[in-house]
């Protein structure tokens, strides 16, 4: 099991933690069913040439996984760190139905495991929200990586119901480390 750091960011908005994650990690991996959301557009703009998008429906494709490894190799990253970002679980629930987080967790883990076996990573950055962020945290921990989660002030987290709550540090740790991978 990897190590987990959860940061309560000074700002209460999501934009500031996205800036931090995109500028701190070597590369941003965006996984989504909808890349037209404000969050996905902001993430792409902030990460610039260090951005790689994978439509969720292509996540299991070995050729996409291998293309991403080739992208990482071209980046010549010093830190071998990855910002895992993407749609919140609410976007996935609209398509796949309630209770989809465990499936998303499993599929993101399989993708990152394939990548990590070919291009060893040492750290995952995440915004810690439900959906892809949460799946990236769980996958990183399972792979034995250092994981840094940046939450808006008050440990604010968005749930499947698309509502923001500030559950506190203990609840954030429980949610981000609860087993859901098969």
Image (cartoon, rainbow, N blue to C red):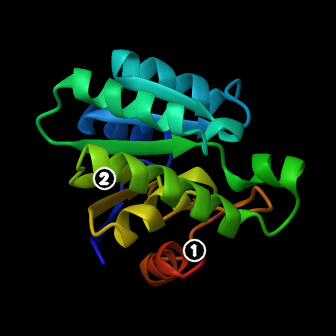
Q: Please, is residue 108 above or below residue 146 in the view? A: above
Q: Quadrant of residue 150?
A: bottom left
Q: Secondary structure at mark 2?
A: helix
Q: Position of residue 29 (x, y in %)?
A: 45, 36
The answer to whether residue 159 is seen in the rendering is no
Place residue 22 in its image quadrant.
Answer: top left
Q: Closer to the camera, 144 or 116?
A: 116
Q: Is residue 160 above or below residue 37?
A: below
Q: Going from the N terminus, do you reach mark 1 or mark 2 first?
A: 2
| Residue 117 - label | 2
Q: Tell whether label 2 touches label 1 (CB within 8 Å).
A: no
Dot 2: few (<14), some (14–19), or many (≥20) neighbours within 10 Å?
A: few
User: Which image quadrant: the C terminus?
Assistant: bottom right
Q: Which circle, 1 or 2, is nearer the viewer? A: 2
Give how far apart the Cα atoms at labels 1 and 2 are.
18 Å
Q: Residue reaching furthest left? A: 78
Q: Quadrant of the N terminus?
A: bottom left
Reply above or below: 138 against 56: below
Residue with the mark numbered 1: 181
The residue lying toward the viewer, choosing from 11 and 53, is: 53
């Amino acid at each position: 099991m990897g190590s987990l750091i959860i940061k309560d960011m000074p700002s209460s908005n999501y934009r500031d933690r996205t800036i931090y994650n995109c500028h701190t990690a070597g590369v941003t991996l965006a996984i989504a069913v909808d890349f037209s959301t404000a969050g996905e557009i902001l993430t792409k703009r902030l990460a610039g040439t260090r951005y790689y998008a994978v439509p969720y429906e292509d996540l299991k494709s070995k050729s996409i996984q291998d293309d991403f490894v080739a992208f990482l190799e071209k980046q010549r990253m010093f830190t071998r760190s990855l910002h895992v970002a993407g749609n919140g679980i609410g976007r996935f629930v609209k398509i796949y139905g309630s209770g989809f987080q465990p499936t998303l967790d499993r599929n993101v883990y399989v993708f990152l495991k394939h990548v990590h076996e070919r291009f060893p990573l040492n750290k995952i950055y995440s915004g810690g929200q439900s959906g892809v962020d949460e799946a990236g945290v769980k996958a990183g921990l399972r792979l034995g990586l250092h994981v840094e989660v940046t939450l808006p002030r008050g440990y604010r987290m968005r749930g499947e119901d698309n509502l923001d709550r500030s559950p506190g540090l203990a609840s954030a740790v429980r949610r981000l480390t609860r087993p859901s991978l098969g």
